[in-house]
Amino acid sequence: MLTRIRRPRRAAVLAALLGTLPALGLIQLPAAAGASKGAGDGGITAAKPYLGWSSWSLESTTAPGVNAAGQGGSLTEAEVLANADVMAAKLKSHGYTYVNIDAGWWMDDKWKTEYDGNGIPKPDPTRFPDGMKAVGDHVHKEGLKLGLYLPVGLEIADYQAGNFPIAGAPQCHTHDIVYPDLRTTNGWDSAYKIDFSNPCAQKFVDSEANRMASWGMDFLKMDGVGPGSWKSGNNYDNTADVAAWSQALKKTGRNIQYVLSWSLDHAHVATWQQYSNGWRIDTDVECYCNTLVTWQNSVVGRWNDVIPWIADAGPGGWNNLDSLDVGVGSMDGLTDDERQSYMTFWAMQSAPLYTGDDLTKLDDYGLSLLGNDEVIAVDQAGHPARPLTQDSDQQVWYSRNSDGSLNVALFNLGTAPATISAPFASLGIGAGGSATVRDLWAHQSLGTMSGQFSATLPAHGSRLLKLVPAGGSLVSYEAESPANVLSGGAAVSGCTGCSGSQKVGSLGHEGALTFTGVQAAKAGTRTVTVVYDDGDTNGRPFTYSVNGGAQTTIQAPGTGGWNTVGTLTISVPLRAGSNIITFTGPDANTYSPDIDRIML
């Protein structure tokens, strides 16, 4: 398994920046199926992952000349508009539209916060001399969209600045909406927790949303959200805030994407899906060093951390992997091979593609990465990829398109060149195991291949392919599907090497797994590929039956580990239409392998 180094990220940096000042107010954010509706595809906001630019990577770096006035100094109206102009000229034609202004827009260059007479954050006049409405107008004239940022909760600095009347509800004041004991919340404890049992709390959130919508806001990143942001417990449960903001944004009448940050608690994914359009699954990608990111400390951890979230993304809400800093080789802190692998993985995950680079310095290779329409199409297809296995640094990830083709990425996460193979059978390619292959980075068709695709990749290198099965593809039935029947102690469990990161185990000893709805166009004998894992050296037997008929027992070879999948094939008689296939152990004393899926 790959390893990475954890290090303090934004929380520590921001605390150091602000010293003993009570308000931090800096960091990032997400959405979901059933979140806000709008003018997107099919009336769904965030029908596809968004593409754009964000200011935070540049704000966070200590690279020479970027933040001469101190960290965050790069956040100015001039710099935002310069990047917007380049995006309009060079990237808009590829789908990039969002210009997202991150933390600090309501603070001066010493990170002192500023609020208006209603306690609403006010753009700093030095950073944004023409005001945020003018910035929004400029961005919209370019055919782009404006994004803004807020931390969750009522900032301590806002509370200390005065007891402000709430806009639109003068009978309410900002001191009314927090708990009397002034309990703190968010990832930095920089805000007081809002008590949403008080109707004035929603009025305040509405007032903020309306004010920012009046500037032309099309995107909001809510940061420091819990459970998540390295915090848990009642004080850090911001689910009420998330719901309140979802309601407020919809009431503005604008089609506003709403994204949450950071390291959200997966146990609450249903809430993130209900109320938002995206959720940061991890900590900041930035390294807080003299580059924007680094491979080991920043980027590579996503290959592990995304696993529990893969099945949660879809139209309306996407897994957010954070900024895609691949556009400027002199600043990114990566080799060209790492830059390509970085974007390949983001695209394979259907993650939002938003770069944090200084686009005025965009180099030719960076433009070739960010502007590769074939790779962007993989991202926009909206099918987050799964790994065949993660038991080594040489990995194959794949996703299936609605037309039966597959997107397949080969990654060498190791530190030396290595050969990686993608076996077609494991990818569900039937009809003799042949497929036409296209290299999406090279824009080159490689012809028809049989059995597998292999390539020798440099350290941290990658290939991205589109495979079209020559005779069609196998239909896959996941063991953990809710349509299946588990009995006698059989249970779903995690599996890093399995499709969907789950499998069904505890089979045998009366535990059984029954696949329902296995379809056959006509009656006859069919070959079924069983994908399983078995950590016993000598392997285990399993027993199967079809449509309640006779049982057959077969010995399955060991696969080398309980997260390492293998395959075997069985021949089964199927009737036309729907069938059931049951797997268990041969007797009440014997366990069988765990099952990932079957394919036929």
Image (cartoon, rainbow, N blue to C red):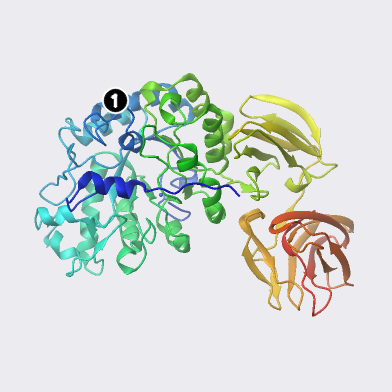
Between 422 and 193, the one nearer to me in the picture:
422
The residue under label 1 is which amino acid type? Gly
Q: Residue at 33% across / 52% down in the picture?
A: 250
Tell me: residue 582, above or below residue 222.
below
> In which quadrant of the rendered view does residue 286 lie?
top left
Q: Secondary structure at mark 1?
A: loop
> In which quadrant of the rendered view does residue 338 lie?
top right
Position in image of residue 530 (x %, y %): 79, 58
Position in image of residue 314 (x %, y %): 53, 50
Between 259 and 472, the one nearer to me in the picture:
259
Q: Which residue is mark 1?
A: 65
Q: Residues within 10 Å of mark 1 (few under 14, many from 20)?
A: few
Position in image of residue 300 (x %, y %): 52, 42
As drawn, is 434 to the left or to the right of 236? right
Residue 579: tell me if it is visible. Answer: yes
Q: Residue at 51% across / 26% down in the picture?
A: 371
As drawn, is 329 to the left or to the right of 375? left
Q: Residue at 29% across / 25% down in the picture?
A: 65
Residue 168: tell me if it is visible. Answer: no
Count every numbered label the image shows and give the total: 1
Between 354 and 397, the one nearer to me in the picture:
397
Position in image of residue 475 (x %, y %): 75, 52
Tell me: residue 364, above or below residue 110.
above
As drawn, is 10 to the left or to the right of 133? right
Between 357 and 34, the one nearer to me in the picture:
357
